[in-house]
């Protein structure tokens, strides 16, 4: 008879991980896996930072501007995370037609408002207001970050 002393904690860990990652279906799949499996795949982290092509120094410029003008209270670390984007969304809501929630998520509506700022504010964006942060948006955002 095979010892289950080491395999039970592994199965329990797999069940807990399955529930945390994918709910009941993932936990059921883990429970049916063989006890011989001893490796657990790492769950990729959700990327909370979106610099849209800015260097760390450029992102720090943006964060300093947000701190001075839009209530940003986070670290000046060169990483445009949710708190940076919440402050930016306040600017975009007031001046550039952003109608979404101040949620710190730079989604399509945030990018559209950013494109309006970059186009109408004279930062060199000449593309469509489409919510896609392509190279034109990124280049104009770099100009903005260098010029503020």
Image: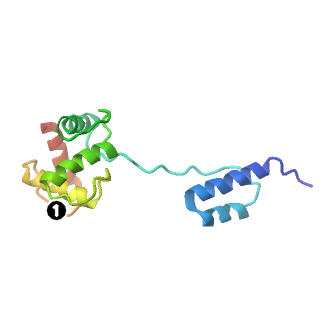
Identify the image quadrant of the C terminus: top left
Identify the image quadrant of the N terminus: bottom right
Which element is circle 1 on? loop
Q: Where is residue 62 in the image (x, y as percent from the top left)?
A: 21, 39
> Is there any visible trace of residue 1 in the rendered image?
yes
Q: Position of residue 93 (x, y in %)?
A: 18, 54
Asked if residue 85 is positioned above or below residue 130 in the image, the reply reads above
Count the marks: how many? 1
Residue at the (68%, 51%) spot, across then down: 13
Q: Where is residue 17 in the image (x, y as percent from the top left)?
A: 62, 53
> Is there any visible trace of residue 132 in the rendered image?
no
Taking depth in this image into account, of 126 and 76 the one nearest to the observer is 76
Residue at the (61%, 58%) spot, across then down: 19
Q: Where is residue 104 in the image (x, y as percent from the top left)?
A: 31, 50
Residue at the (24%, 45%) spot, across then down: 87
- Residue 24 location, quadrant: bottom right
Taking depth in this image into account, of 21 and 103 the one nearest to the observer is 103
Report the colour scheme.
Answer: rainbow
Q: What crowding class fits label 1: few (fewer than 14 Cα within 10 Å), some (14-19), or many (20 or more)?
A: some
Horizontally, is 40 left or right of 93 in the view? Answer: right
Q: Residue furthest right?
A: 1
What residue did someone put label 1 on?
A: 129
Residue at the (13%, 56%) spot, across then down: 116
Taking depth in this image into account, of 64 and 145 the one nearest to the observer is 64
- Residue 11 location, quadrant: bottom right
């Amino acid at each position: 008879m095979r010892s289950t002393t080491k395999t039970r904690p592994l199965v329990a860990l797999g069940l807990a991980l399955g529930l945390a990652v994918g709910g009941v279906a993932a936990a059921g799949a883990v429970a049916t896996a063989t006890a011989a499996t001893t490796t657990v795949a790492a769950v990729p982290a959700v990327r909370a930072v979106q610099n849209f092509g800015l260097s760390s120094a450029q992102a720090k410029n943006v964060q300093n501007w947000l701190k001075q003008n839009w209530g940003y209270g986070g670290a000046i670390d060169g990483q445009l995370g949710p708190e940076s984007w919440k402050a930016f969304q306040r600017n975009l809501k007031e001046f550039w037609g952003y109608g979404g929630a101040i949620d710190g998520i730079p989604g399509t509506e945030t990018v559209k408002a950013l494109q309006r700022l970059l186009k109408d504010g004279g930062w060199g964006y000449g593309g469509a207001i489409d919510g896609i942060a392509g190279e034109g948006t990124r280049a104009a955002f770099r100009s903005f970050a260098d010029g503020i």
